[in-house]
Structures are given as C-alpha cells and as structure tokens.
Amino acid sequence: MSSSKLSILVVSGSIERLQMAAMVASVGAVSGTAITVLLSMNSLQFFLRDTRSLPPPEGSFGQIMAGKKIPPFKELFENAIDLGDAKVHPCSMAMDVLGVKTADLDGFLASPLGLTKFLTDSAGGQMLTF
C-alpha cells in the first residue's frame, strides 16, 4: 500500500461488501498499514452483540460464499485488530438513529466515532467506501 494509513467507511449491509471491507482491513493491518474502520448506516446492525442475523447477499457471489469455508467478516475485523494496527469504530450518528448503546455492540469495537473526526483523522491517507 502506498500510504501508511487507510480509512474504510462501511455503510452497506450486504455480505459481499462487509466481507470485502473486512478482508481489506485484515490484509492492510497485517501488512503494517494503520487501519481505521467506521461502521455506519446499514452495516452497524450486524455488529450488535446479540444479533444472529446474517447480512443478505447483494448478488449471486454472496450466495456462493455461503457454501464455502471463508472466514466470516467479523472474524476478519477482529484479526485486523489483533494482528495489526486496526481500530473498528461504530458511527455515533448511526448509534443514535438505531437507539444503540455501546454495551449493545460487539466487544471488539473501539469507542464510537463521528464522521467529522473520522474524516479529519483520514486526511493524508487512502480511503475506501463499502
């Protein structure tokens, strides 16, 4: 990667996009890139501590993935945190809209982050949106 930091904005709730965002985060973190992920809008619901629902597929590839031995996106995000310099934040605005408290979220998530702070911290690096 050409930059030492990568910001990933995840707003989609499809399995393909969540999977790709997690793969980019984990590979980037293991490669020595500082990774900051912001989970917002349709993605945040899949990081609730008690959720058992899986994201719907966007297309046929998502359906095909279901039958394969692919590490789940949450596991990949956790690997990024454990094996590299990665932080995965819930979006504070999305939490407000959904009525979600920090205690309701998966334990591996970092503290809530607003979009303004995310964008400010992202300056000078690369940004991807899923």
Image (cartoon, helix red, strand yellow):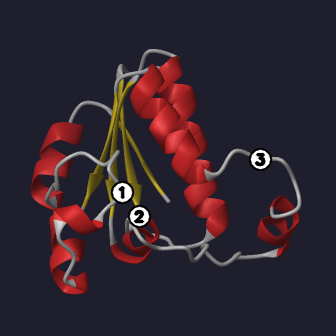
Report which quarter residue 100 is drawn in: bottom left
Q: Kindly identify which numbered label has been placed on residue 47.
A: 2
Work out whether mark 1 precedes mark 3 in sequence or the reverse, and give the earlier one.
Answer: 3
* Label 1: how many Cα within 10 Å (few below 14, some 14–19, many 20+): some
Looking at the picture, does residue 22 appear above or below residue 123?
below
- The three-letter code of the residue at mark 2 reads Phe
Work out whether mark 1 precedes mark 2 in sequence or the reverse, and give the earlier one.
Answer: 2
Q: Kindly identify which numbered label has been placed on residue 70.
A: 3
Inter-mark Cα distance, 1 to 3: 20 Å
SS category of the residue bearing label 1: loop
Could you tell whether 27 is left or right of 10 in the image?
right
Q: Kindly identify which numbered label has been placed on residue 106.
A: 1
Judged from this view, the residue extending furthest toward the front is 50
Residue at the spot 61% in from the left edge and 50% down from the top edge = 20
* Label 3: how many Cα within 10 Å (few below 14, some 14–19, many 20+): few
- The three-letter code of the residue at mark 1 reads Asp
Report which quarter residue 23 is drawn in: top right
SS category of the residue bearing label 2: helix
Residue at the spot 35% in from the left edge and 19% down from the top edge = 4
